Image (tube, rainbow, N blue to C red):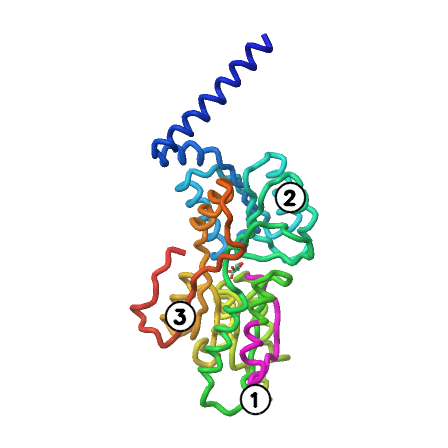
Amino acid sequence: MRKVLLVLLAALVLSLLRSVYSARRFGDEDKAAEEFESKIVLGFAQLGAESEWRSSSSASIKEAARKYGVELMFENAQQKQENQIKAIRSFIAHRVDVIAFSPVVELGWDNVLLEAKAEGIPVILVDRHIRTDAERLYAAFIGSDFIEEGRKAGRWLLEKFRNSEGEVKIVELRGTDGSSPTKDRAEGFREMIGNDGRFLIVRSLSGDFMRSKGREVMEEVLSPAYYNPSAGMTLDVLFAHNDDMAMGAIEAMEEHGLRPGRDVVVISVDAQRSALEALRNGKINCIVECTPYIGERLMDLVRQLVAGYEIPSTIYSEETVFTEDDPVESLPVRPY
Ligand code: GZL
């Protein structure tokens, strides 16, 4: 009986291989690809749903998996690293073909990624980086150059104040502390304005990339203890690491009778729909784009990886800057 089963199994495997081979052999790549692709299983550990940007990133990944016929196991960690680690371990247990994730913070991934490596499951970092001394813990990073995003914000600010003499007081609204976009945007911004003595970062506080916290932080910044124009305690610029926090801060400014975009110059990052609307209405002066739409490029990478092709170790998104000088009709209308 056992022998009969083994023979049947061998025949089944043989016929499957023959059909894929013959499809490839006779140029029917689509059929082979289709048969092959339906076999790809991708485990994705998303960090949370802290911002509209993140929701769009998740939508982009799910949509692309459907389009490319990749079977997606998707877990949302509610911004907790231990949940992301649990999700990655479950993908390892399910023996997925590839693991991808957006690390909520840069440190603390070595053990779980070594476990994936030991099982021969390749890992792709999406959107955010990790910091590690271990070698080859992941196959590739796909996302934005956050340091360059910070430089773009600083470069625009230098241009904005090119003809002014006096001190420029800046409040920085940081994203999630310990995350690569927060560290790198801050670094790039300081790299650009650091040598110009006019610019002073008077407060730097974390709003965790969330609208509600951006509003809370700005309410504190505008409290009488810190903001009192008659005593010279003013604020000239807000640099927010993402649009959600900028929008929350704008609410707080308006409640304090300030005109965002006029009394306070506002610089943000992402270029989501609500921030582009605020740019059109003169409440934001500059938005550095950070695109969440990397789902299709991720699925393409996954397919190449599973097919055994060499893939680039770093793939950066193409991004631009939108400013108050752009003709309103030229600004993109975003679905997110
Ligand atoms: C950047 C991404 C950041 C966005 C925020 O790629 O990680 O996280 O800028 C999001 O909106 O919360």
Give the quarter of the figure containing the C terminus.
bottom left
Q: Looking at the rendering, which quadrant does residue 286 occupy?
A: bottom left
* Crowd tier of the residue under label 2, counting other residues whose Cα lies within 10 Å: few below 14, some 14–19, many 20 or above: some
The quadrant of the image that shows the N terminus is top right
Residue tagged 2: 117
Of residues 189 and 262, the one nearer the viewer is: 189
Q: Amino acid at mark 2?
A: Lys
> Left or right: where does residue 289 sit relative to residue 28?
right
For label 1, the residue is: 230
Q: Amino acid at mark 1?
A: Ser
Q: Secondary structure at mark 2?
A: helix
User: Mark 2 and mark 1: span between their CA atoms?
Assistant: 61 Å
Could you say which quadrant of the image residue 94 lies in? Answer: top right
Disc 1, disc 3: CB below 8 Å?
no
Secondary structure under tag 1 reads: helix
Residue at the top extreme? 1
Note whether ligand 1 is within 8 Å of mark 3: no
Answer above or below: position of 222 versus 177.
below
Among numbered discs 2 and 1, the one appearing first in the sequence? 2
Give left or right: position of 117 versus 9: right
Q: Residue drawn at (53%, 91%), measured in percent from left and top?
A: 166
Per the rendered image, the range of residues in magenta is 188-209
**Neighbour class for label 3 at 10 Å: few (<14), some, many (≥20)?**
many
Would you say residue 135 sits in the magenta stretch?
no
Residue under circle 3? 322
Q: CB of mark 2 within 8 Å of CB of mark 1? A: no
**Ligand 1 under 8 Å from disc 1 Cβ:** no
